[in-house]
Amino acid sequence: MSNDDIIKIEGIGPKAAETLSNNGFNTIEKIAQSTAEELSQLPGIGAATAKKMIDNAKAMISLPTKKEVSKAKAAKVEAPPVKKPAVVKKPPVKKPTVAKKPPVKKPTVAKKPPVKKPTVAKKPPVKKVKKVKKLKAGKQELTPTQKAIAAYPKEYTIRLKRVKPKTQKKKTKAVSIKQTFGIVKNVIHDGAGKSTNRTIVLSLYNTEIPLEKYLGRKIEIQIPQSVKKYVGKITQIHGKRSSKNQNVVVRFPKSVSPHIVAAKAKIF
């Protein structure tokens, strides 16, 4: 059928007919058998329009309603079931019983009695006689302690233990940091565009203990030719640990003046 047949359905125009035929609904029968949900998904066709199209298409081809179909089914007279002819089963064929052969008994072989080995009389253990060393001419006599041990019976012999001499502990020198001082090397900027600079690099001199021991110590710095004093704390070691560099980082609670460079620091 062409689009002219679909246009005959009431409610379908030329544009709707073109849309329906392009999407596979090109006959009155297909539109009548479709649902409103299927047609409403097509562009330009609403749910109410789709329902009218289906009802008009059904009226044109005079499809039977659900009630008519159910009445036709009820009117049909059920045909009586066709009885299948009974199949006569053949009696089972019995297989002839084969007489079982009696099991062949193996001849029992008489076991040989075990041969007893002759018992060999064990020889009594030979006691070793301790050789007594005789003192040769020209050798020294036994010491008084050796003589006393030899005089006691065996159960009273005393074993002398060698006592190791106690090693004296090396006296460690008392370390101090009274003589240590530092000179301010430079000021570390806290960040771009900030005026507060509270961190400096300090070079230590006359260090008497490992550099790690200085961490957490307080320092006091006085700017040359001024009364201003700054008290800070050593927070970390600056630079590589492997180098002989004695530089540490000092942090102050307030910002410091740039004139602090080359100032001397006291450590306490």
Image (cartoon, rainbow, N blue to C red):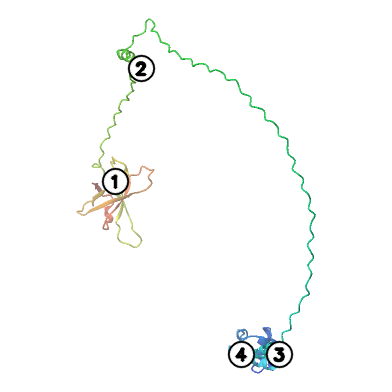
Q: Residue at x 70, y 88 (%)?
A: 29
Q: Whole-percent x and y of residue 251?
A: 29, 54
Q: Could you tell which of marks 3 and 2 lies nearer the N-terminus?
A: 3
Nearer the observer, 129 or 54: 129
Of the residues shown, which amino acid type is indicated by label 2?
Lys
Q: Which mark is residue 214?
A: 1
Distance from the alpha carbon under mark 3 to that under mark 1: 99 Å
Q: Is residue 86 above or below residue 102?
A: below
Nearer the observer, 144 or 227: 144
Of the residues shown, which amino acid type is indicated by label 4?
Lys
Q: Whole-percent x and y of residue 154?
A: 35, 17
Q: Is residue 81 above or below residue 210?
A: below
Nearer the observer, 116 or 181: 116
Q: Nearer the viewer, mark 3 or mark 2?
A: 2
Quickly name the residue at label 4: 51
Q: Which mark is residue 154?
A: 2
Disc 4 is placed on an element classified as helix
Question: Residue 49 is drawn in which quadrant?
Answer: bottom right
Q: Could you tell which of marks 4 and 1 lies nearer the N-terminus?
A: 4
Q: Could you tell which of marks 2 and 1 lies nearer the N-terminus?
A: 2
Distance from the alpha carbon under mark 4 to that under mark 3: 19 Å
Q: From this viewpoint, is residue 15 visible? A: no
Would you call the spot at circle 1 few (<14 residues within 10 Å), some (14-19), or many (20 or more)?
many
Disc 1 is placed on an element classified as helix
